[in-house]
Structure formats: C-alpha cells, structure tokens
Amino acid sequence: MSALPDDPAVERSPSDGPAGDGLRPVHVLTVTGVTAVTPAVRRVVLSGSPAAVAAAGPTVSLLVPRVGDAVPRWPRVAKDGRIVWPDGAHGVSLRSYTARRQDPVAGEVEIDFVLHGDGPAAAWAAAALPGAPLGVAGGGSLGDRPAGSLLLVGDETAIPAISRILDTAAPSTRGVVLLEVAGTEEEQPLAVPDGISVRWLHRGGLAPGESTLLADAVAELSRPEGDDVFAWVAAESATVRAIRADLRARWGLGRAQHHAIGYWRRGRAMSPAG
Ligand SMILES: Cc1cc2nc3c(=O)[nH]c(=O)nc-3n(C[C@H](O)[C@H](O)[C@H](O)COP(=O)(O)OP(=O)(O)OC[C@H]3O[C@@H](n4cnc5c(N)ncnc54)[C@H](O)[C@@H]3O)c2cc1C
C-alpha cells in the first residue's frame, strides 16, 4: 500500500496537469458521526459512494486535511497508483489506517483513530465533526492468511485489523492474541473463536512504544506444532522488529508464515506535512 511508512511512493507534480493527463481524483468520504470507543480511541463513521467505501480498506491510505479545512486541495492518483500532489502548500497528510467496518452497499465505513496526541491524523480525528471531508487514495490488504494456528500481536493501532482478522477466522482456528494497551479502560470487546485465547497487556504509566510487554510475551510462547501456522504482528516499529526476529529465529517461520509491520515509529511522523 502506498502510504506505509517505508514505502511512500509519492511524488510531486510539476503542475496540477491538464485535464486528460490520466490522473484521477481521489475518493472523498464525509463524516457522519463520531463516537468514543475508549478514552484513547475515537471511531469516525464516514459515508461515500459504494466505490469510495470499497476502496477504503481493509488498510486505507487516507488523505487527512488540516483541522477545519472544509475544502482541501486534494492530490490526484496516477494510473499506477502514485499520488500526485498539487504544487505548493496544501495541508493534506497521507496516513495509513484500517477500516474497522466497511459496507459499500450502505455506503458506510468506520475507522478507529488512536488519539495519541500530536500528528495530523490524530488531531483531525479528535476534532472531526459531521460534514468534514476525508480523502481516500487507495486501499490494500491486511497481509493476513488463514491458518489452523494463528498468533496475532499488536497495540491499540492494530486492534481494528486484528478484529477483522478474527471476524474471518474459521471457527476451528486455534491460537493466541496478544494486545498491548494502556490499561483496562482501553480493552475492547472482540469476537473470538473458542480455540483462540486473548491476553491484554497493560503498559500502565509507560508511554506507547516504550514497553517490551509484547516482545516479552511472544518470547515466552512455544511454536505450535505443524506448518499450518501464521503470525500477524503490528505495533511500534522497534517492537515489531524484535518480535519478527524472534519468530523467524526461534519459531523458524518462513516468509509465507508471517506478516510483521511497523504501524508507527516513536518520535517520527509517518510522512512530512504537505
Ligand atoms: C497499514 C496501517 C494501518 C494502520 N491502522 C491504524 C488504525 O486503524 N488506527 C490507528 O489509530 N492507527 C493506525 N495505524 C497507525 C497510524 O498510521 C500511525 O499512528 C500514524 O503515525 C498516525 O498519524 P498522525 O498524523 O496522527 O501522527 P504522525 O504525524 O505520523 O506522528 C506524529 C508523532 O506521533 C507519534 N505517534 C504516531 N502514532 C502514535 C501512536 N499510535 N501512539 C503514540 N505516538 C504515536 C509519532 O512517533 C510522532 O512522534 C496504521 C498504520 C499502518 C501502517
């Protein structure tokens, strides 16, 4: 997906380009409602055309306007998926998110934003009101794969993805879900097959990305028997690197048996402000 931290695939155009230049407009969704999922997670409900909603997930490259900008200068999208930005300051930021729920027929999509503080997306979500626009540059897969035995590991930012993976898991799936959040107030209800256990890990007063709770918990797990195993990991980048190395070395997981991706980086914005 184009908006992942290591793969921006974004370029600036010398000009906005004439009509007929092969660039398409981005999809634009409109906020219809906002609710608090937990103290630190805000759910934004958006409406749009069936095509716009279908394009918005499961992972989605969002184009986030400045807070209060009702008429943003959107980029456009080239045939190969590259995002082509307008010249000059536009205030639109490219950020990766996950559609927690997507219903193209109803024209509705829900995105859960962690209100982590500074950052264009967190600030936009904290201030979002019905009527506000949000752009969609494209969508991608979650990188998951069905398996008899699943290990799902993540922090708050990964809960929407993990909930979608659990929703589609076969009832016979076995496995473990490890989720790091600040405390009990940040736990969310999840629909989980009987053979999967969920452990919530509380980092308490530590800042997000500072604890080793997830890596330590994975290090205590033994590899399930057989090859029908898949591990999906998403959290702060350094945490993910540690877990990926452990699963490759100790569990001997091959490339097709795991997907481990940094969802954010401590002290670093996902991409520069536009
Ligand atoms: C494929 C994918 C799917 C994602 N899905 C979701 C999702 O559904 N919900 C969600 O909330 N996030 C999700 N994320 C993570 C989200 O993209 C990042 O948290 C992003 O950095 C937020 O953008 P921002 O503009 O708020 O902050 P940025 O401008 O990117 O960063 C500003 C500062 O905030 C810090 N920061 C960023 N995120 C966090 C955080 N979570 N906790 C603490 N500090 C942080 C950065 O280190 C930086 O110092 C996903 C990421 C990827 C790659």
Image (cartoon, helix red, strand yellow):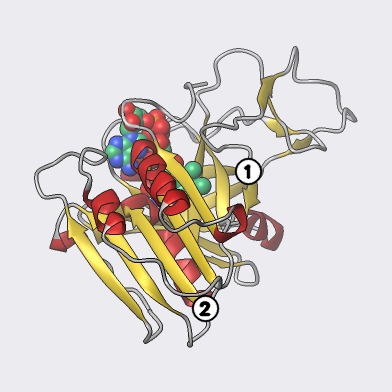
Q: Position of residue 31 (x, y in %)?
A: 47, 52
Q: Which residue is mark 1?
A: 1
* Vertical order, 61 against 111 (above or below): above
Three-letter code for the amino acid on which mark 1 is drawn: Met
Asked which secondary structure carries label 2, the reply is loop
* Residue labelled 1 has its Cβ within 8 Å of some atom of ligand 1: yes
Q: Quadrant of the N terminus?
A: top right
Which residue is located at x 39 percent, y 74 percent? Answer: 175
Q: Position of residue 235 (x, y in %)?
A: 37, 47
Q: Position of residue 50 (x, y in %)?
A: 68, 63
> Which residue occupies the foreground of this view, 174 or 222?
222
Answer with the quarter of the image where residue 193 lies.
bottom left
Residue 115 left/right relative to 101: left
Q: Nearer the viewer, mark 2 or mark 1?
A: 2
Which mark, by number, is residue 148?
Answer: 2
What whole-number distance in Å separates the C-alpha atoms at marks 2 and 1? 27 Å
